[in-house]
Image (cartoon, grey):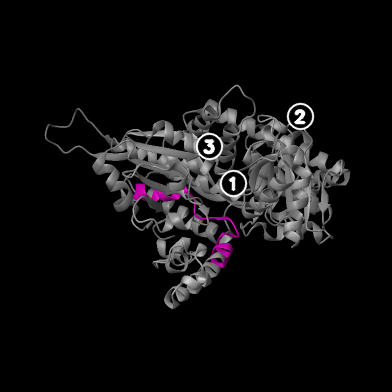
Amino acid sequence: MLISDNRKDFYDPLLQNRSHVLILVSHDLDSIAAVKIIRYIFECDHIPYTIVPIRTRAELQRAYQERRIGIRFILMINLGATSDVIDVLMPENDVQIFIADCHRPLNVHNVYSEKDVLVLCSITGLNNIEDEFQKIPKYEELFWDSDLDDDDDDVDVRQLSLEQLRKRNAFKKFETKRLQLMNEYEENSHYSYSTAMIFFDLAWKLGKDSNDLLWLVILSVTDKQNTYKLPSDLMKREMGYLSDSMQRLRNIRSDRGFVLNINRDDAQPPGNQQHSELVMTTNHLNISYEKDLNLKLYREWSLYESLCHTMYTSCGFKIWKLKGHKRLHTFLAELGLPLNQSKQKFQSMDLDLRQKLKSEFDEKKVKYNLPKLICYNFVGCRGIRQKFSASDLAMASRALLEAPGRDKSYNQKFFDSFDSLTWSNQDLIDTGIGLAKVQLSAIVKQVQLIIDAHLMSMMNNVLWYVIIPESTPDANLFCHPGCLKALTIYTLSAYASFNSKSQRAIQMPLVLITPDPERPGMGLVCGVSPLLALKECQTFYRQAFLTTSKRMANISDSWSYEESIIDPDIAYITYKDGHNFLHELSLLLES
């Protein structure tokens, strides 16, 4: 059931019962920001909770079974919306399940559940249940309320009455129409508004919002923007909402960043009124929305390295060729930037050069056909030393979440990312920035290898594909959903930049398969839409992978398939059968 008032239908029952809440949260930055906000709200009102990070469907089922005793309320963050959660969890009759999930399409059983499942989707001024219902088939088109028994199919037609025959024919027509509607409804996967925004809206209604919570939402939205998880129209609305919220909080004098300072004068006679004023504390978080360079981590890196490792500029200059490197050097020369300045840490560059960068970049973007070289970005500043762009901090947190190596468990990595969103954890933030640089470097090197070794091939003239060899040294980085998705999009963009005159390069999708060192014999498959359709943020891979997997089960006895609950464009498959899987997928797309 979709709920229209998150405070009345979700938070008030929790507040009245004060029963323990089991929070099941997905492994992505939007989920981490959302759970950090709801954790703050719960702690303000002393509502007990348990946070359990979830990566797979098996973990989801196991997490509930191990903690089901005494649990009356379950909150699922970026989990469960696309599946029938009652069928997955099989909870007790008195358990209420709340779902806050940006994945779409919503499962119709969750939508039309009477009381056990409640879906949070309303955001003041942005989204409501009427908007969601417009995209969902009507109840009467999906559920048959007649007294016709399913076992009637086994009954001899000659034994049925005329009325029963009419009902039987009507039911068959209904089933045909229902199947058609469901196929159309579930054909494409897409994303709705950021889940963190739902809980920030709740915090606002409860009078608990602040710049710190707003910054968490900004990181969530920025991460979804960087990973092509929101279409441009929704992104513009979210950016408008964030800007309005930033302005509203700036005008509230009682924000947590201010303290009451009473001017005391011992010479004043007793009884005189003391004057007071609000002063800003040194740890107050200031947020601004300003013009910025469209470069990854340039404040924490060198300008040269950032230009080489940002997808937009590296594909624009085609740095994988000698001619591209020369063009990049010419660009820096025209900016008046010596190589020794651009290759040292950005904060160590001459102040005069740093101050002129934005204006110089703005002047050259037309000449070098890079219109998005300057963009708008949220920047957070606390005190006089800590200043980060939302894009950089989002990348650092995601890098901590997907850190390579087995020295830490997935849960530890989750809570490292969780803690990095707190400004006081500077060491953890620095570690995340370092890991983000490692990820970007590995992606660029792998794209260079794919291009040089001609690893990108065409399958049946309907899709591009790449199979990463098992001997790849950075496979432990690419076996994580976020990094794998970034590599796939980067590869397709780089290939299209080298073949800009070929329509196939921008009109066909790319499917990339990489081995999973943490699960021997298994691999990850990731698909991205053609570049022309990438910004629409609608993909068909969830259903296409599932249908292809069913075909593969009839071909290979060793076939294994597992759907990712984090990203619908990613699935886990048997690595050795990867080429056969791609062949069957291409036949499906061709038909």
Of residues 588 and 409, the one drawn nearer to the viewer in this rendering? 588
Point out the image quarter for the C terminus. Answer: bottom right
| Residue 271 picture location, percent across and down | 11, 35
Indicate which label's residue lies in the foreground, 1 or 3: 3
Residue farthest along the left direction in this orientation: 271
Residue farthest along the bottom direction in this orientation: 162
Using the rendered view, name the quadrant where residue 442 is placed: top right
Residue 88: in magenta span: no
Q: Note whether 566 is above or below 349 in the view shown.
A: below
Q: Of the residues shown, which amino acid type is indicated by label 1?
A: Asp
Q: Which residue is mark 2?
A: 473
Q: Residue at x 42, y 50 (%)?
A: 198
- State whether residue 301 appears in this view: no
Q: Note whether 393 is above or below 335 in the view shown.
A: above
Disc 3 crowd rating (10 Å Cα; few below 14, some 14-19, many 20+) is: few
Q: Of the residues shown, which amino acid type is indicated by label 3?
A: Ala
Of residues 528 and 353, the one drawn nearer to the viewer in this rendering? 528
| Residue 361 picture location, percent across and down | 70, 50
Residue farthest along the top direction in this orientation: 407
Q: Which residue is mark 3?
A: 58
User: Please, what secondary structure does the residue beneath circle 2 have?
Assistant: loop
Q: CA distance from mark 2 to mark 3?
A: 29 Å
Which portion, as a residue range, is magenta? 180-204
Q: Of the residues shown, which amino acid type is indicated by label 2?
A: Pro
CB atoms of marks 2 and 3 within 8 Å: no
**Badge 1 or badge 3: first in the primary sequence:** 3
Q: What secondary structure characterizes most of the magenta part? A: helix
Q: Which residue is mark 1?
A: 567
User: Please, what secondary structure does the residue beneath circle 3 have?
Assistant: helix
Disc 1 crowd rating (10 Å Cα; few below 14, some 14-19, many 20+) is: some
Point out the image quarter for the N terminus. Answer: bottom left
